[in-house]
Amino acid sequence: MQQIILIHITGEDRPGLTAALSATMAQHNVEILDLNQTVIHRTLLLGMMVKIPPDKGSTDLLKDLLFQAHHMGLRLRMTPIEDSEYDAWVERQGKPRFILTLLARRLSAADIAGVSNLISTQGLNIDIITRLSGRPPRTDDGQLRRACIEFSVRGQPADEAVLRSSLMQLTRQHAIDLSWQRDSVYRRMRRLVVFDMDSTLIQHEVIDELAVEAGVGARVAAITEAAMRGECDFNQSLAQRVALLKGLDQSVLHRVAQRLRLTEGADRLVHALKEFGYKTAIISGGFDYFGQFLQKKLGINTVHANRLEIKDGQLTGRVIGPIVNAQRKAELLREIAAEENISLQQTVAVGDGANDLPMLAVAGLGIAFHAKAIVEESARHKISTLGLDGILYLIGVRDRDLLNPLP
């Protein structure tokens, strides 16, 4: 009768261990049913589920493997698997799978305990835990750090709405961000990332910068804040603010553009996306002059933003053409995806203000980035602890993937 055995091997890692052990099993004509190996700080953790042919006995295999393991300084344990256990394992392969991504500056045991307990209370099982971030230095080097752990989770949540609410609550109790995604083929094949500009791709609200130059900084900033919190109509608020810029010399646009500071991680993110073949776009309720400035600086593919009217070298206090408001942002995302023949499920949208919410809802992965409270509460994903390059973790990119430039 065929026998199914689970083999568990641990010990100090070095080249050739897996080759030697599998060669020993090959002498017994063993079939490999499942295999998983990882190394943590030079310690090997190797698991194999194998099937021994009817004409072979587990005794001889066990003896040969124990001898081989002892010779290599490894510890080996074998566990027989009952037929019913194996059949139940096979049946579980149809269960839904999800990816829970944990982001922080530093990870603590309390963070992991909180997340894993939440997963458990929903009746879910963690299959794999993977570190996506690089290896942290032993001592603090003063540099901004990134930490990310990815949980591969199997099962159907008892109540997904409660789960999402609990995840959000956990981020308020710990200095972490959590992203819950279904582990579908689309999650692994994102192709388009679109950015809001002001307070997302850059650290400024450009209209507020222009208002300072025009001597109306406080008045415009107050309207901007209200608009981003969703407290007033965006079209009306934009018209009010732009009207206050009437008479400003167009040379100010260049001066303001030169002092714009990118958000942490913006250049690293866009560079990586280009290397991996993603399309990128700016969809902004700000102004196209600055969007095009950033397009040249970062290599963004497409820019859609409002256009300031300029006559005789001065701003007229009006914008030209349809306003890029909340609804238009979502429409533009759909249009770009259609032009590029990209499914909306393969798109990522990033923004911080209330006027970004429709765009975030349309995207396959909508991310509220250091966002206003109304946006954090409504968006399905958020990043508030890391820079923009934290988005790379949400699409499954590891730090080590970026160590060596792509050809």
Image: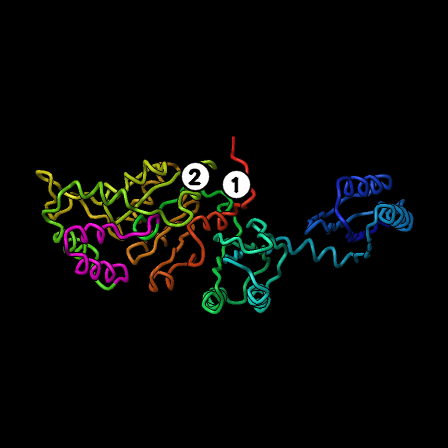
Pick out the residue farthest to the top.
407
Label pair 2/1, CB-CB below 8 angstroms: no
| Residue position marked by numbered label 1 in the rendering | 402
- x, y percent for residue 94: 61, 53
- x, y percent for residue 365: 43, 51
Q: Residue drawn 53% across and 54% down?
A: 147
Q: CA distance from mark 2 to mark 1?
A: 10 Å
Q: Secondary structure at mark 1?
A: helix
Alpha-carbon neighbours of circle 1 within 10 Å: few (<14), some, or many (≥20)? Answer: few
| Residue position marked by numbered label 2 in the rendering | 271
24 versus 110 height, above or below = above
Of 85 and 350, nearer the camera is: 350
Of 387 and 59, nearer the camera is: 387
Q: Amino acid at mark 1?
A: Leu
Specify the segment rendered in magenta.
Answer: 201-230
Q: Amino acid at mark 2?
A: His
Q: Residue drawn 59% across and 65% down?
A: 109
- x, y percent for residue 212: 19, 53
Q: Identify the main secondary structure in magenta.
A: helix
Q: Secondary structure at mark 2?
A: helix
Q: Residue drawn 18% across and 57% down?
A: 217
Decide if residue 256 is on the left or right side of residue 132: left
